[in-house]
Image: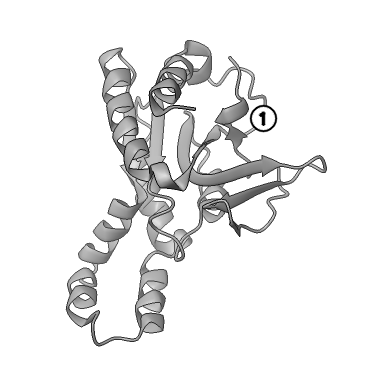
Amino acid sequence: MHINDLSERLFKILSHPNFLGMKGLANEVPFFIQTYEPAREDGIRRMVGSLAIRLQNTGVTLKSIDLFSLVLEELEENGILEYLMNDEATSERIEILETLQNYSDPKTHLIPRLIRAIGDDGVQLTLITGSGRIYPFLRTHTILESLQPAMLRHPVVIFFPGEYAQDPAGGSHLRLFGSIPSPRINNPYYRATNLDHYRL
């Protein structure tokens, strides 16, 4: 689907009162995945920015969050970002990766920061980008599993560069870049709705 067509489709869905009111979700969590081809990363990021402005102009109160920026904020706040930038040329890649993983640990660092960034005071919608840019030190399925206990009361849309499939047995799989699989997500409370197949 062309990016302009995707933008129009998403605008119709995300601005609809039934979607914003989470009608028809029953007991499922209000998480949604919008997949896209990894090669379209830059275009999708621009599209999400324009979409957010358009939704806000129609009165939708939303948060737009980039996970990569969130990681940089965490590293900078802990005085790690400058260290990594200065020592990158002389450090082993495994050391850099371990440092990044320590400071982007979902439970102790990123998820609390993400929940604070999302907020819930009058927010109707959250758009999350950057899931491909934070691989391999944080995966989308980990975000879904960690966010679930927060009991968010509005829809959260995660833009994902890859594939998202639900199998007949009830589990689901995220494949980053279309080739790197996540562990099978069996718990229905951790699954997200695929916006590619969503109908109002």
Image height of 29 relative to 81, above or below: above
Residue 12 shows in this picture:
yes
Q: Around disc 1, counting alpha carbons within 10 Å, would you say few (fewer than 14), some (14 to 19), or many (20 or more)?
A: few
Q: Quadrant of the C terminus?
A: top right
Judge from the rendering whether residue 191 lies leftward or rightward of residue 130; answer left or right. right
Nearer-the-camera pick, 147 or 193? 193
Residue 189 shows in this picture:
no
Q: Which residue is denoted by mark 1 in the rendering?
A: 27
Where in the figure is residue 107, as x and y percent of width and height? 47, 60
Total numbered circles: 1
SS class, disc 1: loop
Where in the figure is residue 65, as x and y percent of width and height? 33, 41
Nearer-the-camera pick, 140 or 59? 140
Image height of 148 relative to 6, above or below: below
Question: Where, by quadrant of the figure, is residue 53 drawn?
Answer: top left
Judge from the rendering whether residue 79 lies leftward or rightward of residue 196; answer left or right. left
Where in the figure is residue 133, as x and y percent of width and height? 38, 55
- What residue sits 67% from the left and 30% below the top? 27
Amino acid bearing label 1:
Asn
- What residue sits 37% from the left and 81% below the top? 93
Judge from the rendering whether residue 26 lies leftward or rightward of residue 196; answer left or right. right
- What residue sits 21% from the left and 64% below the top? 76
Where in the figure is residue 190, as x and y percent of width and height? 63, 45
